[in-house]
């Protein structure tokens, strides 16, 4: 077999693997989009430009009506409404209760990519709350929670014990 035929065959196989992997969610082609998230429902839920809701994987925030819930929503708004964001869906793509997508949200902070889910927890505005099969970043989110606890940030501050108890 000539090298040209072998190379064409390898390219076709590679294209097939990528297409099949994309269909089954193994490979995700992701682009940054400044208009992807159009509003923030609450700290752990955003509304996408498709009008679908999306829950942030692995975390839980207080409702927006509570003081720290409003802080969490403001934290999210400041990071995603006026900047490029991208989403990565979880192994379990949809919340069976709300029919919203399960997502990790990424944003850029001074040129550095950050995962919003973990940053909310690190700021003490959310707790780690693993959901179903979506465990890809469980360790990173738990580490962020440990940092917030050690620094007594947000929910972990002694004066917020009642609000923390409401989340558990």
Image (tube, helix red, strand yellow):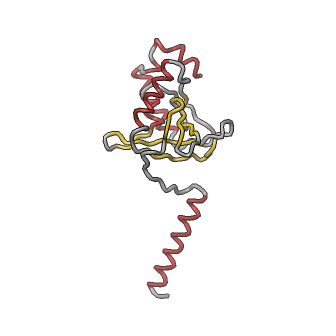
Quarter of the image for residue 114 reads: top left
| Image quadrant where one finds the C terminus | top right
Name the residue located 61 percent from the left edge and 46 percent from the top edge.
93
Q: Residue furthest bottom?
A: 1
In the rendered structure, the answer to whether residue 108 lies left or right of residue 54 reads left
Q: Position of residue 138 (x, y in %)?
A: 52, 38
Indicate left or right for 78 with 164 as reference.
Answer: left
Q: Is residue 91 above or below residue 12?
A: above
- Relative image position of residue 27 (x, y in whole percent): 52, 57
**109 versus 152 height, above or below:** below
Q: How many marks?
A: 0
At horizontal 43% and vertical 29% (from top left) the residue drawn is 75
Q: Quadrant of residue 157?
A: top left
Q: Position of residue 146 (x, y in %)?
A: 45, 28
The residue lying at 58 percent from left, 35 percent from top is 130
- Pick the residue in front: 125 or 158: 125
Q: Percent from the top left, x then y, of residue 45? A: 54, 34
Residue 141 in the image: above or below residue 34: above
Q: In percent of the image, x 45 and y 32: which residue is there?
A: 76
The residue most toward the right is: 97
Q: Residue furthest top?
A: 159
């Amino acid at each position: 077999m000539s090298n040209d035929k072998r190379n064409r065959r390898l390219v076709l196989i590679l294209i097939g693997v990528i297409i099949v992997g994309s269909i089954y969610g193994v490979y995700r082609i992701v682009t940054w989009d400044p208009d992807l998230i159009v509003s923030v429902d609450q700290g752990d839920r955003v509304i996408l430009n498709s009008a679908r809701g999306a829950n942030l994987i692995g975390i839980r925030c207080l409702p927006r009506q509570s003081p720290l819930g409003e802080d969490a929503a403001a934290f999210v708004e400041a990071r995603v409404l006026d900047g490029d964001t991208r989403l990565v869906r979880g192994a379990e793509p949809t919340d069976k209760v709300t029919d919203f997508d399960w997502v990790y949200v990424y944003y850029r902070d001074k040129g550095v990519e950050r995962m919003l889910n973990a940053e909310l927890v690190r700021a003490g505005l959310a707790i780690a709350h693993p959901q179903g099969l979506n465990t890809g970043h469980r360790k990173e989110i738990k580490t962020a929670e440990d940092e917030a606890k050690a620094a007594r940030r947000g929910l972990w501050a002694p004066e917020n014990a009642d609000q923390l108890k409401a989340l558990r």
